[in-house]
Image (cartoon, rainbow, N blue to C red):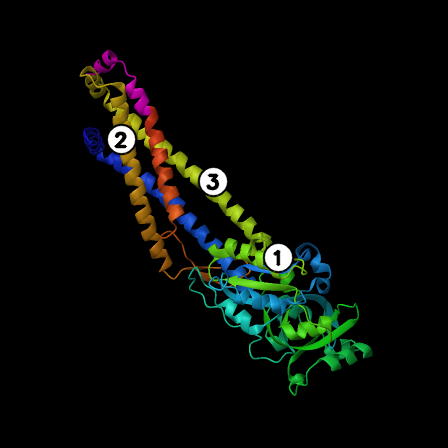
Amino acid sequence: MKTLALAIRNLLRNRRRSITTLLAMIVGAHAVLLFGGYTRNITYGLQTDYVKYGGHLQIERAGYYQFGSGNPAEYGIANYREIIDALKSDPVLAPMVLVVTPTLQLQGIAGNFKQGVSRTALALGVLVNDQNRMRGWNDYHFPVTVPPLALTRTETDAAIVGMGLARVLQLCGQLHVRDCAPQTNPTANAGPGLPADVAQLARTTQAASTSASQQSTIELLAATARGAPNVAELHVVKAEQQGIKEYDDMYVGLHLAQAQRLVYGGDQPKATAIVVQLAHTGDMPAAKARIEHLLATKFKREETEVVDYTTLNPFYGQALAMFATLFGFIALLIAAIVLFTVGNTMSMAVFERTVEIGTLRAMGLRREGVRRLFMCEGLLLGVLGASLGVLSAAALAAVINHSGLSWTPPGRSPVPLIIRVWGENDLIAGTAIGLLLVSMLSAWFPARRASHMNIVDALRYA
């Protein structure tokens, strides 16, 4: 206790220098915590986007992730309904699972043959009600509301397309897409329309619609599971930005039943993936292990695998690695600044108190006692700097979060600027412990030099 009391008095002896040192530590804590909170928010935002649209886990046929894009029909899951029922009724998974829904991915050619244009497309068939439920996932409490899927309450022949695909197919006027190139005269430049055999296929697969002439219509040509061509005439209800240009130029969203008719015709319908969305991301390891156990015991004949969202979206891991590198660089830079600031403060204290150190040593204080005195001062600086830095950084983050500021992520519309500090216990603990360790390390070298002073030489400064 005497050592602590002496350390406090020594810090108060030169208040200006102590306050300057504390301010340097507080600013350093702000830099680390605010940037760390900003990156945490980006991480949670990316995770929320991927989970809302693709779930936490996907059950696929073995090899589909590596090879299925070339021929999705060959990797369809025939008994997907039985698997979904088994997952929903399992007592272990029931508390963890929110949504279990099938999807069907297929490739084809989307064309607007009235304008004589077409291009390759990547289509995804979904159950609309399940997708709307998935869009409500917001485990990290973002102040953003995602609207329902544009296919809600539409006929089975409805579709949505990416903005880029709408531009390529010259649907800008009907879908109110901006930044489009001027359209050519459709009368003078239109192609001959659908070939006769393809047109016949379209007529046999489309549902009757009295408003077809008033809607934006495209033809989606695909190959069935047996290799025969199949086509569906789709009424485009909306064009949506997909965020990634390559995907935006190819995306077609449609009802699962329509996608299954395109790929399987009158045969047994299948799904290329079963999407599982959980209530909390932290349950993912346990849920994955349970699903794999159920598949291995009840559905041995189906060679399936369970893939999580981090594997399905490599960009997520790359983004986390990039921000981790930036965070490490900033933390290292702040640590160097704090190290030299505290070290300079302690060195000045040792120089100014040379006579005091000599007197204490002459009175019988051992070297360990001198070293402990200066180390205690460094510890006090670290505790005060870390405590004030964490509290003020949390308060500053709260002010920023309630200021109404926004920023625009790549490929998205503006979102509120949120910095997550309070509640991120590992980030707070890491920053506080780091400041303590740096301050102790900064004090160790001056303390060691003070403890090794020669008593006679130190008293000469009296």
Tell me the residue that label 1 is attached to.
296
Instruction: Specify the segment rendered in magenta.
Output: 446-462
Kindly state the secondary structure of the residue where label 2 is placed.
Answer: helix
Q: Which of pointers 2 and 3 lies earlier in the amino acid sequence? A: 3
Q: Which of pointers 2 and 1 lies earlier in the amino acid sequence? A: 1
Q: Which mark is residue 376?
A: 2
Q: Position of residue 197 (x, y in %)?
A: 81, 78
Give the residue type at disc 2: Cys
Total labels drawn: 3
Tell me the residue that label 3 is attached to.
329
**87 or 406: which is nearer to us?**
87
Q: Position of residue 27 (x, y in %)?
A: 35, 43
Q: Position of residue 402 (x, y in %)?
A: 35, 60
Dividing the picture into quadrants, the one containing residue 86 is bottom right
Residue, x 27% and y 19% (percent of image)?
A: 367
Whether residues under marks 2 and 1 lie with C-beta atoms below 8 angstroms apart, the answer is no
Give the residue type at disc 3: Phe
